[in-house]
Image (cartoon, rainbow, N blue to C red):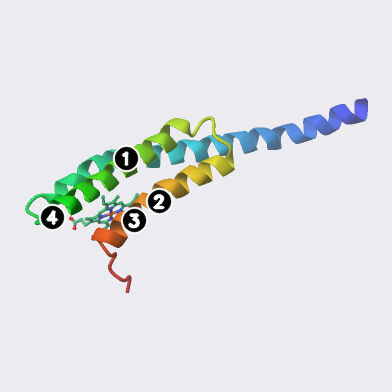
Amino acid sequence: MKQMGRTDAAFLPQELDHEAQEERWRASIAELAGAIVRSAGDIPDVLEGVTLTPESRDEFLRLARELEDRARIVQDEVPELSFSELDERVTTMRASCIECHARFRVLPLVR
Ligand code: HEC
């Protein structure tokens, strides 16, 4: 028993460190997702002065809203999700970036 007690004590600082690291990691994801929520709300502004068919405009606005919703889900659910669930939500959110860019804004090549 005495031996086990010592082992537990030896592991404790590491575990605490791990928890603190996880907390920081989750906090930075929540912050980033919050920034995306706010930016997504501004995306429709880029349509000012741009000529699009009504269908394309609707699709663009739908994708901007979808990104906002998905980023909000990430932001709200960060504290309770497992790593794999979080990974899945972030991947789903990124799909909105990729879809809108593929359709409306091909990213310039990085030189
Ligand atoms: C609803 C459509 C839409 C969504 C969703 C979207 N973007 Fe964009 N993005 C644009 C448009 C349009 C521009 C160009 C804006 C301008 O020139 O004023 C742009 C510009 C950018 C730029 C600057 C480079 C460039 O092409 O001018 C980056 C980087 C970028 N987006 C990344 C992202 C990321 C990362 C996400 C997801 C988190 C995202 N975008 C989601 C439409 C979108």
* Mark found first going from the N terminus, 3 or 1: 1
How far across and how far down the image is residue 3, in percent? Answer: 91, 30
For label 2, being within 8 Å of ligand 1 is answered yes
For label 3, being within 8 Å of ligand 1 is answered yes
Q: Which mark is residue 68?
A: 1
Q: Residue at x 86, y 27 (%)?
A: 5
* Mark found first going from the N terminus, 4 or 1: 4
Whether residue 64 is situated above or below residue 5 in the rendered picture: below
Reading the image, the residue beneath label 3 is 99
* Mark found first going from the N terminus, 2 or 4: 4
C-alpha span from label 4 to label 1: 23 Å
Image position of 4 (left or right of 10): right
* Mark found first going from the N terminus, 4 or 3: 4
Q: Which of the two marks, 2 or 3, is nearer to us in this view?
A: 3
Reading the image, the residue beneath label 2 is 94
Q: How crowded is mark 1: few (under 14 residues within 10 Å), some or many (20 or more)?
A: many
Q: Residues within 10 Å of mark 2 (few under 14, many from 20)?
A: some
C-alpha span from label 1 to label 2: 11 Å
